[in-house]
């Protein structure tokens, strides 16, 4: 019973075979998929997917790349979406200082406003952090985001920072790059973070794990992330699957 805690199955790359992708996920033992939004349009699509497929749940939010598209009206529309069935989180939100597709001051404002939304509607958040480690942590602390719940999606920071997050009750989600030969830092994170605070994800269609690296990612490949974590922690695959699924169901309040 695998839980892919982050997949973008609304992406155009799945338009030709979405049903097949979801069928393959089921056949691979995936029982739950969290599909976050990246802007208002994709948030709507996430809600639609959740209403169509029993195994899919939705998060709604504006990604830092698209922060420049958010205004007060979009924020209110997102608030409306949080009332829809199977919307279990606000995300993905955060900061991306690698690409800077949106100006940094606008990213910060968008991030803070969506944390405020999450607190208002009492939903946990899914956080994107790329090359903005210190600022993301500072904003989460200042806005008291840990009160509603913080999930660090596709975590790429240090093991030391991961420990700080865990100390504050946050969860760390591990994606396909942990299977890469160059993944020394992420391997240390997996060694350091207790299994009670780990989740697994694909971030499909991106970040495809070995042995399919270079191809389109999909939810059925989340098992390779689980296998790598089991190898690193020297525990059974069954234990990794059971615990990461339990963690995700608890975090997203899925019964």
Image (tube, rainbow, N blue to C red):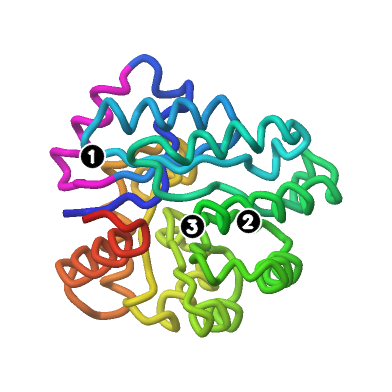
Tell me the number on the disc at residue 55.
1
Among the 4 quarters of the image, the one containing residue 174: bottom left
Dot 2 alpha-carbon crowd within 10 angstroms: few under 14, some 14 to 19, many 20 or more = many
Q: Is residue 28 magenta?
A: yes
Horizontal and vertical percent position of residue 209: 39, 50
Q: Identify the mark nearer the N-term, 1 or 3.
A: 1
Horizontal and vertical percent position of residue 177: 47, 56
Horizontal and vertical percent position of residue 135: 76, 67
- Side of 149 where 14 appears, left or right: left
Q: Label 1 to label 2, Cα distance in Å?
A: 26 Å
Q: Identify the mark nearer the N-term, 1 or 2.
A: 1
Horizontal and vertical percent position of residue 197: 38, 74
Nearest to the observer: residue 124 or residue 5: 124
SS of the residue under disc 3? loop
- Side of 121 where 101 appears, left or right: right
**Which residue shows up at 59% across the image and 30% down it?**
40
Nearest to the observer: residue 244 or residue 53: 53
Q: Identify the mark nearer the N-term, 2 or 3.
A: 2
Q: Name the residue that disc number 3 marks.
A: 122
- Side of 99 where 185 appears, left or right: left
**Which residue shows up at 49% across the image and 34% down it?**
81
What span is in magenta? 17-32
Specify the principal SS of the magenta part. helix
Q: Is residue 16 above or below residue 244?
A: above
SS of the residue under disc 2? helix
Q: Label 2 to label 3, Cα distance in Å?
A: 10 Å
Which numbered mark, 1 or 2, is in the foreground of this view?
Answer: 2
Position of the N terminus by quadrant: bottom left
Q: Name the residue that disc number 2 marks.
A: 115
């Amino acid at each position: 019973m695998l839980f892919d805690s982050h997949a973008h199955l609304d992406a155009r790359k799945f338009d030709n075979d979405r049903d097949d992708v979801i069928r393959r996920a089921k056949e691979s033992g995936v029982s739950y998929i969290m599909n976050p939004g990246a802007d208002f349009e994709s948030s709507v699509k996430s809600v639609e997917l959740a209403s169509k497929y029993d195994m899919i749940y939705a998060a709604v939010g504006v990604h830092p790349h698209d922060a420049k598209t958010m205004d007060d009206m979009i924020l209110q529309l997102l608030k409306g979406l949080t009332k829809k069935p199977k919307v279990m989180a606000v995300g993905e939100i955060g900061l991306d200082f690698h690409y800077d597709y949106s100006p940094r001051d606008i990213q910060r404002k968008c991030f803070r406003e969506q944390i405020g939304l999450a607190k208002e509607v009492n939903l946990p958040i899914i956080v994107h952090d790329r090359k903005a480690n210190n600022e993301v942590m500072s904003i989460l602390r200042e806005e008291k985001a840990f009160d509603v719940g913080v999930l660090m999606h596709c975590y790429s920071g240090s093991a030391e920072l991961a420990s700080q997050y865990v100390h504050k009750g946050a969860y760390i989600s591990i994606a396909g790059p942990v299977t890469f030969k160059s993944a020394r830092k992420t391997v240390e994170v997996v060694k350091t973070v207790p299994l009670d605070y780990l989740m697994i994800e694909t971030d499909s269609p991106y970040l495809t794990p070995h042995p399919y690296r270079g191809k389109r990612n999909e939810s059925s490949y989340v098992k390779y992330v689980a296998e790598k974590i089991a190898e690193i922690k020297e525990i059974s695959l069954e234990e990794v699957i059971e615990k990461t699924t339990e963690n995700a169901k608890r975090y997203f309040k899925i019964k």
